[in-house]
Amino acid sequence: MDAALKDPPAGDVESVMAEIGVRARSAADALANASPEAKTNALRAMAASIRAHEQDILAANARDMVIAEQNKRPSAFLDRLKLTPDRIESMARGVEDIAALDDPVGSVIAAWERPNGLKIERVRTPLGVIGIIYESRPNVTADAGALCLKSGNAVILRGGSESKHSADAIHACLAEGLRTAGLPEDAIQIVPTADRAAVGELLKGLGGTVDVIVPRGGKSLVGRVQAEARVPVFAHLEGICHLYVHGPADLEMAREIVVNAKMRRTGICGAAECLLVDRACAATHLKPLVEALIDAGCEVRGDTETQKADSRVVPAGEEDWGKEFLDAVIAVRVVDGLDAAIAHIARFGSSHTESIITDDEAAAAAFLARVNSAIVLHNASTQFADGGEFGMGAEIGIATGKMHARGPVGVEQLTSFKYVVHGAGQTRGD
């Protein structure tokens, strides 16, 4: 990006953002017709650049970590922000995984022929220009840039101020990959200012150049985006994920899943925030599950019955049901069967991810059919709510709405479609 744009004068944010939008639209037009080979080459070059600049990325991240620690940010926030050599390597592999995916642009979703001989195809097309607003997780820079490129979209990235140095360092690697492949650098731009007014301009659509907004962050961010956006939004709301241990559930399997779902990484959106234990198995399962969580370092906030199971359980307040802790804290409640579990999820969930642990196939089928969340699982950890684990390479976020994209938003979800009709001289009569 031009040096003049890196620190815009006060009051000039509107013109800077307008220029970014114009440049993104021009790049989107070029990407829509870029060959699959050119995009794949760019992505591979990006991964190589990320590896080559590992020390630069770590140094930038160290600056962000110092600032976050000085601001006394919570441990879960610091975990999301922190980069390590392993996480950087994982980021590079994620870009390579996206490169290896089939190119969705131009693929035929469906085809049929009408009685009059017209041949109709539904064909995938890019959305155009995507604005992505995210907070503390620097790897979103690489994931989002790579996914948008693979799906033929230009992207405008606006990361959180506390991850700015990390995001800038990663973005520099993406720009290098675009240059290497001869694709326009404006295909992946990063907002050059921390001024909150830039977000407002992005939400307005930058004069019609932005086609969709994807917010990736906490409730306040998503709420602002949904309230102010003048373009369509793929909402990634809170991850208030539930585990339901149904009566005939294998205790050892339940214990492993529960601890993993909560404690593998507590700060991700797929971490379980509430455990529901069926009264039919509470006598045998509740105490061991609570003990396993506490022994793993998790604070358990429970209802009266859960408190009786272990003296270390903290009484749950009404605000703990439906709360995204993003930390080593979980709410636990005993419920009266499948209907009560589903009712609890419907009342307190965020339509993100829910899992049932049971050996009863009929109960599992009912749960999977009746729970209307973006992702529902049977006998598996909620931490699998991830585009990479779904074979999508990565994802921009988990869409919790009900329109167009639901669940992991990967390359296919970042496309729309058009109808291509082939004729042989047909005309339409009255």
Image (tube, rainbow, N blue to C red):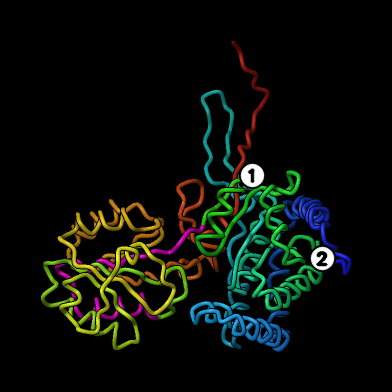
Residue visible at 55% across and 68% down in the picture: 393
* Residue located at (59% from left, 46% from top): 232
Nearest the eye: 334 or 417: 334
The Cα atoms of the two marked residues, 1 and 2, are separated by 33 Å
Task: Point out the stretch of residues depicted in magenta.
Answer: 236-263
**Mark positioned earlier in the residue sequence (1 or 2):** 2
Q: Which residue sits at x=46%, y=50%?
A: 401
Q: Nearer the observer, disc 1 or disc 2?
A: 1
Instruction: Tell me, yes or no, if residue 38 can be seen here.
Output: no
Looking at the picture, tell me which residue is in the foreground, 132 or 419. Answer: 132
Residue ID at (25%, 56%): 342
Is residue 141 shown left or right of residue 283? right
Q: Is residue 284 above or below residue 148?
A: below
Q: Amino acid at mark 1?
A: Arg
Amino acid identity at mark 2: Gly
Q: Is residue 248 magenta?
A: yes
Q: Which residue is mark 1?
A: 230
